[in-house]
Image (cartoon, coloured by chain):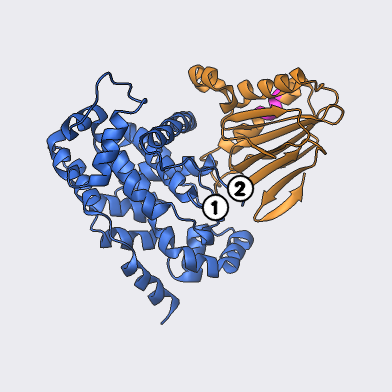
Amino acid sequence: MTCTDDILARVGEISPLPGTVVRLVGVINDPSSTPQDIVEVVKYDQAVTGQMLRMCNSAYFGLSHEVSSLTEAVRYLGTMKVLQLLMAVHGNALLAKEQTGYGLEPGILWRHSVAVALTASILGQRISPDEVGLAFTAGLLHDIGKVVLNEYVGREFAEIARLVRERKTSFVEAERQVLGFSHDEIGEKVAEKWKLPDSLVRCVRHHHDPSMLEPADPLVDTVYLADCICLLLGIGLGADELNYRADPAVMGRHNLHEADLELTGASMMCELKRVEEMFADASPASSRKQPAER
Amino acid sequence: MDLVVDIADCQVSNDPQVELVTYSLGSCIGVAIWDPETRVGGMIHYMLPESSLSQEKAKANPAMFADSGIPVLFRSAYELGATKKRVVVKVAGGSSLLDDNGTFNIGKRNYASLRKIFWKNGVLIDSEHVGGQLSRTLRMNLGTGRTTIKVRGKEIEL
């Protein structure tokens, strides 16, 4: 078995995305859906229902009465918060483990993914306003290929790092040259296996090379920029460091300036703190992670 | 004992047992200052060059920006007994993506903003490690003033 066959076999072994997540993404993808549709999806997911009620009754919301029904909880939280919570509960299991090949301590890929998701939903309001829920989901899942490729990157890291260092090859190009696949390509295969909507598959595949798409896709541009902002701000930097190519066309396509990105980054940091506090508040088991020394 | 300086955070201390540390500097910049006589030290990890971007955010958290945060770092260290003429200043960060066109200049702008503030105030940088595509961890021991950065798993004296 060659390395590339072996990697492909690994894609087949990744845990399936929970049905609730797939269905909720479907509901959010559909502009005609109502809050009741969300209730219908979430009510079969006990972990998430419990979390939602706990969150509504937490100090963060400061409500004067206890929220006990799911319908009421969905109304208070709103679609975005429900999605955030659902993805947090399920995405955490997928993304929170340490990824030693990428030099990521436990919790760091997860923090990066949440930060990109929040940044994508902030930017999405401007770039792809009809797809803010999808922008969040795409941001959260964009690096899913790293979970599969991690072990192989670890094994061949010296050679990948040499290409990056000596030839200024970007990390994804080096992955491709050494392993036969890059994490965005493997992520695409995982997203397809999960039967995610095409728009999400495209985001995962092109989050490092959005201008490869013809015509350009605003949702992909959103996730690309969100990832750049979070990498630049050092949220979830691993052994791949900042070795990714800047794409000069994206900003022009959406008439964005450096100040727009900076402001987005600043807003995201405030939001990230709030979201981490909110999750910590809603779930006594979850802990805020401090990056350990690399 | 590690005292962690978060992103958009500033910490000072006069406890010689303390090691100030900030992780994962990308385009952000970490500034560490230390007074060898009083052994007072401080560190900031700021994100962005100028508070004019959002006065509201700068007010809520001055350490987010170079121009609002760096004065807070120095002032807080002076309050604990450091003096300007004695402080040693070390700087790390300011990285960028592989970016021939200068599409995302946050790292360079962060560094330029720092130079401007230091020049205006007559502060000299004793040593620095900036630029490139690196992720850096900056660490300063307040007992000895020893300052290091960690890049690609290697510790380098700063």
At horizontal 77% and vertical 44% (from top left) the residue drawn is B158
Residue furthest bottom as drawn: A1
Where A212 sits versus A47, above or below? below
How far apart in space, not on screen, are marks 1 and 2 (Cα)?
8 Å
Tell me which chain the residue with mark 1 is part of.
Answer: A
Write down the residue under mark 2: B135
- Residue A282's spot in the image, x, y percent? 36, 35
The amino acid on which the numbered mark 2 sits, given as a three-letter code, is Ser
The amino acid on which the numbered mark 1 sits, given as a three-letter code, is Gly
Q: Specify the chain shown as blue.
A: A
Instruction: Report crowding for label 2: few under 14, some 14 to 19, many 20 or more residues within 10 A (C-alpha).
Output: many
At horizontal 37% and vertical 34% (from top left) the residue drawn is A123
Where A266 sits versus A147, above or below? above
- Residue B29's spot in the image, x, y percent? 63, 36
- Please tell me in which quadrant of the rendered image residue A78 appears: top left
Write down the residue under mark 1: A238
Q: Is residue B62 left or right of residue B37?
A: left
Q: Is residue A31 left or right of residue B138?
A: left
Q: Specify the chain shown as orange.
A: B
Q: Is residue A148 left or right of residue A32?
A: right
Q: Which residues are magenta?
A: B113-117
